[in-house]
Image: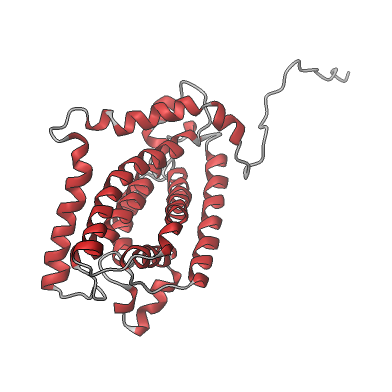
Amino acid sequence: MKEPKQMWTEEIKAESSLFAINFREIWHYRDLLFMLVKRDFITFYKQTILGPLWFIVQPLLTTLIFVILFGNIAKLSTDGIPQLAFYLAGITIWNYFAESLTKTSSVFTANASIFGKVYFPRLIMPLSIVASSLLKFAVQFALFILVVLYYTFVAQSIQPNLWILFTPVLILLMALFALGVGMIFSSLTTKYKDLTFLLAFGIQLFMYITPVVYPSSALPEKFQILAKINPLSSIFECFRYAYLGTGTFTIADLLISTLVIVFLFFAGVLVFNKVEKSFMDTV
């Protein structure tokens, strides 16, 4: 005898596709987002001696090391830009990208205990990382602006231009790039933990194929293709051109970088949305 079909009083299922981003739900949990940003920005440095001053000390020390190693010993070109301004420009935006990518890549494994206890949109976590990193970037960016003002009005050795107005777009592109790649790696590391070590090494290597300590114009012609296929190259060159007056980029390069970054971001959202439904079984 055929059993009667069971009629469920309530059915739980996904409300959106894998590609969808529920902005309304994320906005509903905005207080949680602000709380996580506060935790990352304040609590982490609460028991340190210098506190938030590390945001200034770290890029300054790194810049001085780059000036000694790459500027005075290796004699790398800075396209006629004062070394302090040149290296600080690259370090300022690289720090934001690298920190956002590194922390986003461990979202699932680092927050498994939280995810297993309470529900909230999982995208809140990577978004809070990008937001808290942006606050740290703001402090370092203010330091960079002071250096730019000195070399513009006192030393009169650089010439900023109207491309400065494009800065928010450049920061947004780096944030999307870090989110996209970070979410992909975060999803993969739920099953393959050793990818964490690969990413740590990869980020260090990636800095040297990105024009952080050298201008793209200093690359030999046979290596110029590396600058073209690296989405960050045009962003870094545009940033330097805007604030220092020297840089090698075209609008076409920026458009190509934008397309690649947007593709990687939506690929990251797709993988992230898929893995979040079952990652607790593998973490």
Residue depicted at 38% across the width and 74% down the height: 248
Camera-nearest residue between 57 and 124: 57
Image quadrant holding the C terminus, namely top left
Q: Position of residue 47 (x, y in %)?
A: 18, 28
Camera-nearest residue between 13 and 28: 28
Camera-nearest residue between 102 and 31: 31
Residue depicted at 42% across the width and 51% down the height: 178
Please tell me how many numbered marks the rendered image carries: 0
* Residue furthest out toward the top: 9
Q: Position of residue 115 (x, y in %)?
A: 46, 27
Q: Position of residue 176 (x, y in %)?
A: 48, 51
Image quadrant holding the N terminus, namely top right
Q: Is residue 68 above or below residue 142?
A: below
* Residue furthest out toward the front: 153
Camera-nearest residue between 83 and 9: 83
Q: Position of residue 277 (x, y in %)?
A: 56, 34
Q: Is residue 65 above or below residue 142?
A: below
Q: Is residue 56 left or right of residue 196?
A: left
* Residue furthest out toward the bottom: 221
What's the colour scheme? secondary structure
Residue depicted at 20% across the width and 46% down the height: 56
Residue depicted at 56% across the width and 50% down the height: 266
* Residue furthest out toward the right: 1
